[in-house]
Image: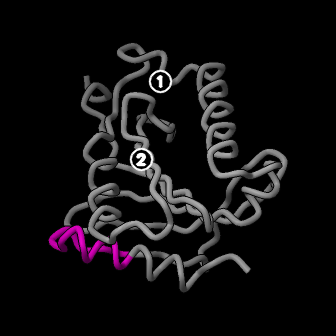
């Protein structure tokens, strides 16, 4: 059947604050979900640019497009909600954020998608601080990275983009 061949391009997410950079694998066919079987890499904000580039590449390589019947746990809403609460609590504890507002109000979020010969990063804006929901408009900044760049060059582009579009 035609739908059995559906496949999304590799995807990843970057959550960045002044205290950490967190790269996560994103998977799914009809929705984007932080993948528990993928990569979850937490780095200090002053991490080596090569390690930053390698982290994004590793997350993109781990991205997958399983059908719901093949991996129901990936798409299970309650499990996703539990994993999110654990992830959020872990980052808050490890980096001394006392409240969700303190962490999310300084957080930058970039959705990455690999297509053809480039990686596209779309910066998202927080729409609702209490629900940690994110949105994007056509005027929000985009980062395009050519696939042929080295890990060092990819990491440098990411750090430059974060610096140029830091939350104020």
* 3D distance between C-alphas at marks 2 and 1: 19 Å
Question: Which residue lies at the image location 44% right of the left edge and 34% below the top edge?
Answer: 35
Q: Position of residue 1 (x, y in %)?
A: 25, 22
In this orientation, which residue lies closer to the viewer: 84 or 99?
99
* Residue hosting label 1: 74
Q: What's the image's color scheme? A: one colour
**Residue projecting furthest to the left:** 148
50 lies left or right of 101: left
> Magenta includes 102?
no
Q: Percent from the top left, x then y, of residue 19?
A: 60, 62
| Residue visible at 34% across and 47% down in the picture | 59
The disc label shown at residue 41, or none: 2
Q: Which residues are magenta?
A: 144-157
Q: Considering the image in quadrants, where does the C terminus appear?
A: bottom right
Number of numbered tags placed on the structure image: 2
Instruction: Give the answer, above or below, for where 45 lies relative to 81.
Output: below
Q: Earlier in the sequence, mark 2 or mark 1?
A: 2
**Hey, which quadrant is residue 15 in on the image?**
bottom right
Evaluate if marks 2 and 1 touch, with contact meaning CB atoms under 8 Å apart: no
In percent of the image, x 69 and y 46: which residue is there?
92
Point 66% across, 27% down: residue = 81
């Amino acid at each position: 059947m035609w739908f059995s061949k559906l496949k999304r391009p590799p995807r990843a997410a970057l959550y960045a604050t002044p205290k950490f950079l967190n790269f996560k694998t994103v998977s799914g066919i009809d929705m984007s979900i932080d993948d528990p079987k993928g990569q979850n890499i937490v780095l200090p904000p002053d991490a080596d640019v090569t390690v930053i580039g390698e982290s994004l590449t590793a997350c993109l390589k781990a991205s997958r497009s399983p059908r719901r019947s093949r991996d129901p746990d990936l798409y299970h809403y309650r499990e996703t909600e539990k994993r999110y609460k654990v992830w959020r609590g872990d980052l808050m504890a490890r980096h001394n954020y006392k409240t969700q507002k303190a962490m999310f109000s300084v957080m930058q979020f970039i959705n990455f998608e690999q297509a053809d010969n480039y990686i596209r990063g779309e910066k998202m804006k927080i729409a609702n601080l209490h629900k940690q929901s994110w949105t994007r408009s056509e005027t929000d900044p985009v980062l395009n990275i050519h696939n042929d760049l080295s890990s060092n060059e990819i990491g440098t582009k990411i750090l430059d983009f974060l610096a140029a579009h830091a939350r104020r």
